[in-house]
């Protein structure tokens, strides 16, 4: 098998058809560039869906993986592992306030994915209430348009009905409110003062269309959770590890959660997830109550340590903020140049969304961009999500913007918009 078509033909025979893959078979990459098996070059502006923080084939990450693979791949959680301890130390330290002080979150559970991390959050919140003698506190508040994972524990938190269909989700234990509406949260908590064990929110709704939380929303959730005895769980699976120009997006708001799930960019492409909790929650998940065979395995942990240390050495969090501003300006310029195709941009740092004009589907633009050599992803039917590696530079953004502009020019203008512009 040496061509895209040959590999895809076999894949269609043997892989479960639960994904909607583009007709591209990627073979290798370097930095923000990718090549398929036939040698065609693409600019990577989706980063494996906000995963490839260091880009592709970064020597520090490759070297860490090679070195650890030669030492020890797996040991299980029946013994200690130095890479796992080192990773947990790093993660805890990243939650310290600027200028020093105690970490906001001081205990770490390591797992294999974002969904696993969110599953751990669900179990911890409910068991926390149980251990306090409040077994009736089994409900969660989450938000419409959100995404928190696909397991039967995490899926009910996801505030998008299309993901629930046919799975028998326990939706009775989750109430979805409008994102950004603190008055709705207060009203629900006042009506059910002893039922909610956790309030779950994304600082930026990623899958839901790259929607940053309104100013004051996270601070308001923090105050309400404290007032009514619920845990505040801020989902940093997509926003964490420098993506938004801070190590964690809640740091922009100056408010810390009780519980934080992480994944995606943490391993730079190696599967890993984590749940961080404040010190008072240590012991809620006592031995035997929760675990995972592969969680914190030496290979994944060593990869994550390499990602964090490289980001610190190369100041990639600061770079994400700077390049995020530059990318934002370029996307806004594209929207001005192609008003019949784009309807503006939004986001935080290097997590950005390019909104489609009415009548233009995001997947239509996704395919056109790919035909012009740029890989993106979609977030809702109307938003192109732009999540490049954090190592991206201005020259790459410029090249990508030119290609996206050419792709936009190749799309037929919807008749209604065309008529409106002519008028």
Image (cartoon, helix red, strand yellow):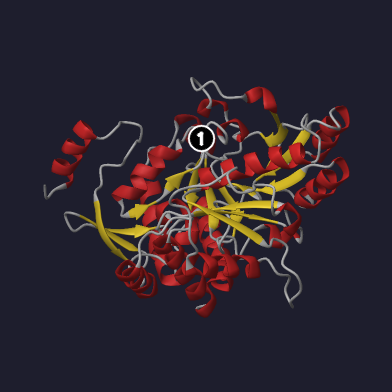
On screen, 290 above or below 136? below
Q: Quadrant of residue 11?
A: top left
Q: How many marks?
A: 1
Q: Position of residue 94 (x, y in %)?
A: 63, 68
Q: Quadrant of residue 159?
A: top right
Pointer 1 local density, CA inside 10 Å: few below 14, some 14–19, many at least 20:
some
On screen, 173 above or below 335? above
Which residue appears at 67% of the width and 44% of the height? Answer: 201
Query: In terms of depth relative to the viewer, which is nearer, 281 or 171?
Result: 281
Residue marked by disc 1: 151
Q: Is residue 410 visible?
A: no
| Quadrant housing the C terminus | top right
Query: In terms of depth relative to the viewer, which is nearer, 242 or 91?
Result: 91
**Residue at the outermost left position:** 1
Q: Position of residue 87 (x, y in %)?
A: 53, 67
Q: Is residue 28 visible?
A: yes
Which residue appears at 29% of the width and 63% of the height? Answer: 29
Q: Position of residue 47 (x, y in %)?
A: 42, 56
Which residue appears at 40% of the width and 58% of the height? Answer: 270
- Position of 369 with respect to 355 (left or right) is left
Q: Position of residue 288 (x, y in %)?
A: 58, 44
- Position of 6 with respect to 141 (left or right) is left
**SS class of the residue under badge 1?**
loop
């Amino acid at each position: 098998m040496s061509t895209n078509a040959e590999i895809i033909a076999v894949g269609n025979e043997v892989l479960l058809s639960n994904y909607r893959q583009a007709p591209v078979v990627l073979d290798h990459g370097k930095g923000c560039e990718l090549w398929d098996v036939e040698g065609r070059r693409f600019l990577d502006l989706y980063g494996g869906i906000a995963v490839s923080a260091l880009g592709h084939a970064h020597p520090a990450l490759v070297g860490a993986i090679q070195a650890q693979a030669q030492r020890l791949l797996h040991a299980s959680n029946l013994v200690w592992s130095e890479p796992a301890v080192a990773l947990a130390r790093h993660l805890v330290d990243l939650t310290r306030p600027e200028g020093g002080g105690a970490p906001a979150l001081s205990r770490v559970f390591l797992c294999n994915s974002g969904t696993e991390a969110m599953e751990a959050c669900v179990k911890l919140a409910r068991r926390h209430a149980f251990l306090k003698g409040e077994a009736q506190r089994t409900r969660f508040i989450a938000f419409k348009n959100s995404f928190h994972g696909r397991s039967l524990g995490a899926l009910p938190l996801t505030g998008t009905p299309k993901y629930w269909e046919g799975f028998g989700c326990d939706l009775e234990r989750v109430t979805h409110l409008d994102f950004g509406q603190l008055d709705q949260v207060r009203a629900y908590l006042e009506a059910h003062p002893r039922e909610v064990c956790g309030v779950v929110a994304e600082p930026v709704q990623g899958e839901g269309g790259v929607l940053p939380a309104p100013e004051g929303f996270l601070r308001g959730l923090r105050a309400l959770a404290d007032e009514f005895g619920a845990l505040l769980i801020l989902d940093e699976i997509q926003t964490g590890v420098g993506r938004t120009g801070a190590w964690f997006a809640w740091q922009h708001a100056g408010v810390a959660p009780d519980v934080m799930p992480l994944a995606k960019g943490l391993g730079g492409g190696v599967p890993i997830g984590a749940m961080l909790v404040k010190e008072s929650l240590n012991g809620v998940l006592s031995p035997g109550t929760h675990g995972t065979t592969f969680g914190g395995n030496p290979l994944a942990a060593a990869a994550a340590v390499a990602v964090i240390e490289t980001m610190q050495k190369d100041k990639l969090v600061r770079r994400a903020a700077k390049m995020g501003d530059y990318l934002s300006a370029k996307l806004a310029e594209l929207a001005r140049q192609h008003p019949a195709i784009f309807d503006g941009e939004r986001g935080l740092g290097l997590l950005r969304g390019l909104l489609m004009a009415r009548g233009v589907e995001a997947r239509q633009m996704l395919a056109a961009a790919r035909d012009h050599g740029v890989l993106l992803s979609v977030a809702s039917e109307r938003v192109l999500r732009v999540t490049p590696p954090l190592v991206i530079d201005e020259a790459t953004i410029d090249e990508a913007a030119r290609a996206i502009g050419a792709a936009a020019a190749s799309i037929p203008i919807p008749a209604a918009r065309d008529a409106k512009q002519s008028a």
